[in-house]
Amino acid sequence: MLITDIKRVIEQVSREKGINKDILISTLKEAIESAARKKIGARADIEVHYDEKTGEVEVFQFKEVVPVVQDPEVELTIEDGLRYDPECEEGDSLGIKIDTSQFGRIAAQSAKQVIIQKMKEAERNAVYENFIHKKGEIINGIVQRIDRGNIVVNLGQAEAILSPREQMPRENYKRGDRIRAYVLDVLEESRGAQIILSRTHPEFLVKLFASEVPEVAESIVVIRGAAREPGIRSKVAVTSSDSDVDPVGACVGMKGNRVQSIVQELRGEKIDIVQWNPDVAKFVCNALAPAEISKVVIDEENRSMEIIVNDEFLSIAIGRNGQNVRLACKLTGWHLDVMGKDEYSRKEKQRHDSLMKIPGMTDSLAQTLCENGFCTLKDIISTRIENLCSVSELSEDDAMLLKKRAGEALQLSRSHSKSNSLQKSSEKIDNNAGSIDDISGNNTDNVENNGDTDYASDSSDDSEYSSDDDRDNSDDASEKKDENRD
């Protein structure tokens, strides 16, 4: 069959939907084959051929030449075979061209349904294949609608979702607004590819620098890490592979124009660009800038540091609501404990006094142990003997004795703490008993007051008696007045 428009339709759909032409042609063949089986029979051997140059579609039914036909769908006699091919012989397989106009309306409708279904599947697969390679990249789109807080973004061939937790605070969009976001993930689901966007991910900031700073795009300046509190503040660690290129200056740009364009995209989010250093202590000091660091104590086993700063820089190092040190922790991957010099001195004295509780401990040995991270009795008890020997000049016997004495000192300290708590409890009980006595004394006073009330009631009775005498005197006076009248 020759369909004049089929070639044009295939090319147009392939171009608009992004579907490979081979997939469309294969879908067309399957649909026509399904229609042919509806008309001829399910067991028929059908082949469909499509000519890409002319757009002609041909359908062939193959039958085997046999002496006696038992299954007309797949067999034919030699007499019938000679009508199609004069040179055919028994055992040959003949391809008989079928007139597609005889398929009928039902077969055509079935072919249409197959084409629609296959087209949808091909379109879903094409969307997934087109966007899976864009995972981890920045993409531009237009806000199509807002559904329960989710922003649905039109990317042209597909729709993407920007969920509320991936949106920056105080950022409002309406339909038709252009939006720029980071492709967080591309999921292949039964209903189609689901594209997840983000504007809060740290990699979004990294990709923005790559788009705005040519040195980053060319890998001359390398971004070693990024930490964000979206919409508020972020830190970026950079280094340079070329000694002649200043990584911080390259990211800032002339008069700050490069970093300012990124700040505008992030709605005013403050960005700290810090110099990365292979020495983790120096890197942490750079991350806590502009605070001046006086001392750094590293605990590699627990991956933590104590950062000591001058008291006037303490608030700067910590930042508003702990923001600066929190971002520095995320950026460096270390737990940072920032404290002032006065607080650190008090803490050092407490540690020193704790170690001095061990019998036979000297000031120099206690100081050496503190400097090497053995600051408490538990640290000495839990560590290995070789570790104690390595940080001090103690022999193995002395180290064993030190661990034993540290255990005894800890046990004694716990006993003192327990006795002190018991003493405080007994004092509390005595205080409660005293308060009970006070209450009973108050009750006695109340009883005495009640006795005074009884005496007052007796006096009230005397007043009643005097009132009776007054009543008798008034009666005598009234009798005298009656006699005078008479």
Image (tube, rainbow, N blue to C red):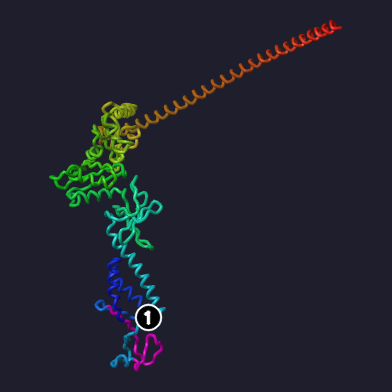
Give the magenta-colored segment's residue range. Answer: 55-80
Closer-to-camera residue (282/62) = 62
Residue at (39, 85) in percent of width and height: 73
**Residue 417 sits in quarter:** top left
Q: Can you give x and y, in whole percent of width and height, for residue 143 in the image? A: 33, 54
Look at mark 1 in the image and give the residue it sits on: 36
Closer-to-camera residue (123/411) = 123
Residue at (74, 9) in percent of width and height: 466
Q: Is residue 234 above or below residue 353?
A: below
Q: Can you give x and y, in whole percent of width and height, for residue 407 in the image? A: 37, 32
Q: Can you give x and y, in whole percent of width and height, for residue 200 in the image? A: 31, 48
The reply to whether residue 282 is visible in this rendering is yes
Total labels: the figure holds: 1
Q: Can you give x and y, in whole percent of width and height, for residue 438 in the image? A: 56, 19
Q: Quadrant of the C terminus?
A: top right
Q: Quadrant of the N terminus?
A: bottom left
Q: Is residue 237 above or below residue 397?
A: below
Asked whether 224 falls inside the magenta stretch, the response is no
Q: Amino acid at mark 1?
A: Ala
Direction from residue 377 to residue 444 in the image, left or right: right
Asked whether 56 falls inside the magenta stretch, the response is yes
What secondary structure is found at the residue carrying circle 1?
A: helix
Q: Residues within 10 Å of mark 1 (few under 14, many from 20)?
A: many
Q: Is residue 13 above or below residue 346?
A: below
Closer-to-camera residue (63/334) = 63
Q: Residue furthest toward the bottom?
A: 79
Closer-to-camera residue (348/64) = 64
The reply to whether residue 395 is visible in this rendering is no
Q: Residue furthest toward the right?
A: 486
**Residue 459 sits in quarter:** top right
Direction from residue 110 to residue 10 in the image, left or right: left
Q: Residue furthest toward the left?
A: 244
